[in-house]
Image: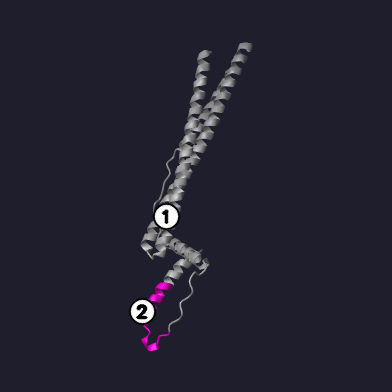
Amino acid sequence: MFSRLFGKTKQETSAIATLDKLNETLEMLEKKEKVLINKASQEVEKAKEFTRAKNKRAAIQCLKRKRLYEQQIEQLGNFQLRIHDQMIMLEGAKATTETVDALRTGAAAMKAMQKATNIDDVDKTMDEINEQTENMKQIQEALSAPLGAAADFDEDELEAELEELEGAELEEQLLQPATTAPAAPVHVPVGLRPTRPAQKQTAEEDELAALQAEMAL
């Protein structure tokens, strides 16, 4: 009797220690997730800065790093979900064990009172226990299956995201009030006006304005 009591106490202590460990792991994953979210936000701000500097290649690199952080955030979310499932399953298993122990105690009392045992009831109980054990094993195997992660990036999607960032930046600039008065127009004779350089400059400004307009979406 004392050995059963000590064994039960040890099992309960082990279950509590396991739940504490799962809680610690869950807190660690949540902290990592917050750090990655912050890093992803920083990459977006860097992409905006490079966009202002017309450094398109550097801005795209920032967006790629942001995508990597987002993949890690999603993976950490899956890990947290698995830990929650494991904790629920462990608590359920602990309750099941306690219930089974109580049923066994009741069965022993009935045996002492009746001095008889029905073998059919024992077989039925064992079949139910084996079935539940098999179901729990299948659930654990499903939860322990590795996750597949793809790191392929679509350049067109990155281009579109960059255009959205540039458009947002343009909208911020348009919403800010003007701090300086516009310069007075300077009259230049038609014969002295440059033709080709003016067209090139206008095309670059139009391209930049289009990118910034997309960022506002």
Residue at label 2?
197
Q: Viewed as shown, does residue 113 lie left or right of 134? A: right
Number of labelled discs? 2
Q: Which residues are magenta?
A: 187-205
Q: Examine the rendering and report whether any part of residue 124 can be seen.
A: no
* Three-letter amino acid code of the residue under disc 1: Glu
Tell me which numbered mark, 1 or 2, is placed earlier along the sequence.
1
| Residue 13 image position (x, y, % from top left) | 50, 24
Point out which mark residue 144 bears. none
Q: Is residue 101 magenta?
A: no
Point out which mark residue 43 bears. 1
* Three-letter amino acid code of the residue under disc 2: Pro
Above or below for 180 versus 1: below
Disc 1, SS: helix
Residues 62 and 18: in front is: 62
Residues 140 and 6: in front is: 6
Residues 90 and 25: in front is: 25
Residue pictured at 43% horizontal, 61% vertical: 48
Q: Main secondary structure of the magenta part?
A: helix
Residue pictured at 43% horizontal, 62% vertical: 162
